[in-house]
Image (tube, helix red, strand yellow):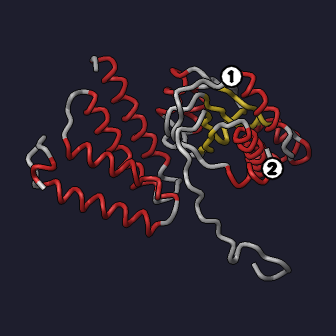
Amino acid sequence: MDLWEAIRGRRSVRSFLDRPVTRETIERLLEAATWAPSGGNAQTWRFVVVMDPAEIRKIKIVSPGLLGDPAAVIAVCQDLVQARAKGGNLGETFLAPVDAAMATQNLLLAAYAEGLGTCTIASFHRRGVSRLLKMREGVEPILLISLGYPAESPPAPARRQEEVFIFGANRG
Amino acid sequence: MDKARLEQAVFELVGYMVTSGRNLLDETPLYGPFRLVDAASRLILILGKEGIASDRLAAMQEEIDSGKYCVMNSKQEFTSFLDSLVDALVDYAGFEAGGDIKEQQ
């Protein structure tokens, strides 16, 4: 798929078909995620994949932003202990979430190219999700991604360009 | 719906509402009204599976679900949507409980 087609075509999907996504497909998406840049090449991200519907329902209880019934949920996490060890305070507090976001965007575009719908979710209770996923100390979920074959094609929201593109200094 | 499935559905709704209560301390203010109307829709869904259904409840759920995501577009659009829901409530308030909407319009 053409890159621009994926960039412009991807939508946040919140309604999914009752159709499984194979582990092999998800592994391709995870590979795409790990090709994202990371500050200082830290690569301290972790990806926890949940495909069991019963487990997904549990995660939904503490994740108000997780809507619909996706085939899989991917918790994009960061090992904050490693992030601090590699990047200091900047690594832990700034680079770790930024890196997670860049990896997430790679995954979203790759998923779209596979015909999948996704939604990035920040509305979840971090400690609640960590406990449900039995994450070890120091590893924290930054974002959740719901994933499945889309049951909807949301229209593209308008893109604001006025005052967004700034060329030259001292105009922000 | 048997008792265990009903309890599970209610527990999940309680989870949605309680976690929303906590998270909304830090989230986009517009998500508060969104979660409220979405919880109303979820409640109607649960009641419907339990056999407690009516035309006006079904109509309210349909109106909520068809427009709730406009919260992502603009505050003005979402506000108009919420106003339209209240208008619908007023329209249906005088209807006989459990009655046929078309007969009463």
B68 to the left or right of A54? left
Q: Between A115 and A65, which is closer to the camera in this rendering?
A: A115
Question: In percent of the image, x 59 and y 44: which residue is there?
Answer: A121
Q: Which residue is mark 1?
A: A22
Q: Are marks 2 and 1 on the same chain?
A: yes
Q: Between A9 and B12, which is closer to the camera in this rendering?
A: A9
Question: In percent of the image, x 82 and y 47: which residue is there?
Answer: A91
- The percent position of residue B54, horizontal first and vertical second, equals 19, 40
Q: Residues within 10 Å of mark 1 (few under 14, many from 20)?
A: few
Distance between the Cα atoms at labels 2 and 1? 23 Å
A171 to the left or right of B36? right
The residue most toward the right is A40
Helix, strand or loop status at disc 1: loop
Assign the C terminus of chain B to one quadrant of the image.
Answer: bottom left
Q: Earlier in the sequence, mark 2 or mark 1?
A: 2
- The percent position of residue A83, horizontal first and vertical second, equals 82, 40
Callout 1: chain: A
Callout 2: chain: A
Q: Between A53 and A90, which is closer to the camera in this rendering?
A: A53
- The percent position of residue A1, horizontal first and vertical second, equals 79, 44
Q: How many marks?
A: 2
Helix, strand or loop status at disc 2: helix
Q: Is residue A139 above or below residue A7?
A: above
Q: Which residue is mark 2?
A: A3
Q: Amino acid at mark 1?
A: Thr
- The percent position of residue A18, horizontal first and vertical second, equals 52, 27
A62 to the left or right of A29? left
Q: Is residue A55 above or below residue B55?
A: above
Assign the N terminus of chain B to one quadrant of the image.
Answer: top left
Q: Amino acid at mark 2?
A: Leu
